[in-house]
Amino acid sequence: TVTLTRGGNYTGAVTLAAANLPSGVTATFAPATLSGTTTSATATFTVGATAAPGTATVTISAAGSGVATASATYALTVPTPAIALATG
């Protein structure tokens, strides 16, 4: 969950974005734009088959008209692919 703090009674639309994603990883936000008094969104990271395992520092930004862009970082870990087999 991404949480936005609105100051000074700001109710304008704020658009969320993610940068510095590893190759093969995409990010979506629901909702992608926070309007009115909405202050949170769900971030979903989709890891494709070509994504290399490891940890990356992703920058999430929030931009609105007439206010400074805010950003935060998130440590995203792409796990090493694995399988398991059980016999019984």
Image: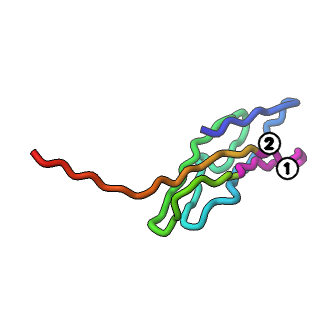
Q: Residue at x 13, y 48 (%)?
A: 87
**Residue 80 x/y as whole percent:** 45, 56
Position of residue 28 measured from the top left corner of the image (x, y, whole percent) = 58, 54
Mark 1: which secondary structure? loop
Lower position in the chain sequence, tag 1 or tag 2 = 2
**In the drawing, does residue 77 fall left or right of residue 87?**
right
Answer yes or no: do the residues labelled 1 and 2 have beta carbons within 8 Å? yes
Q: What mark, if any, has residue 20 been given in the picture?
A: none
Magenta stretch: residue 66 in it?
A: yes
Q: Which residues are magenta?
A: 59-71
Which image quarter is the N terminus in? top right
Residue 6 belongs to the span the image colors magenta? no
Q: What is the three-letter code of the residue carrying label 1?
A: Ser
Pick the quarter of the image with the C terminus.
Answer: top left
Using a 10 Å C-alpha cutoff, classify the residue at mark 1 as few (fewer than 14 neighbours), some (14 to 19) or many (20 or more): few
Question: Which of 72 and 55 lies nearest the eye of the viewer?
Answer: 55
- The residue depicted at 61 percent of the width and 41 percent of the height is 41
The Cα–Cα distance between marks 1 and 2, rounded to whole angstroms, is 7 Å
Q: Main secondary structure of the magenta part?
A: strand
The numbered mark at residue 65 is 1
Left/right placement of residue 25 relative to residue 4 reads left
Q: Which mark is residue 12?
A: 2
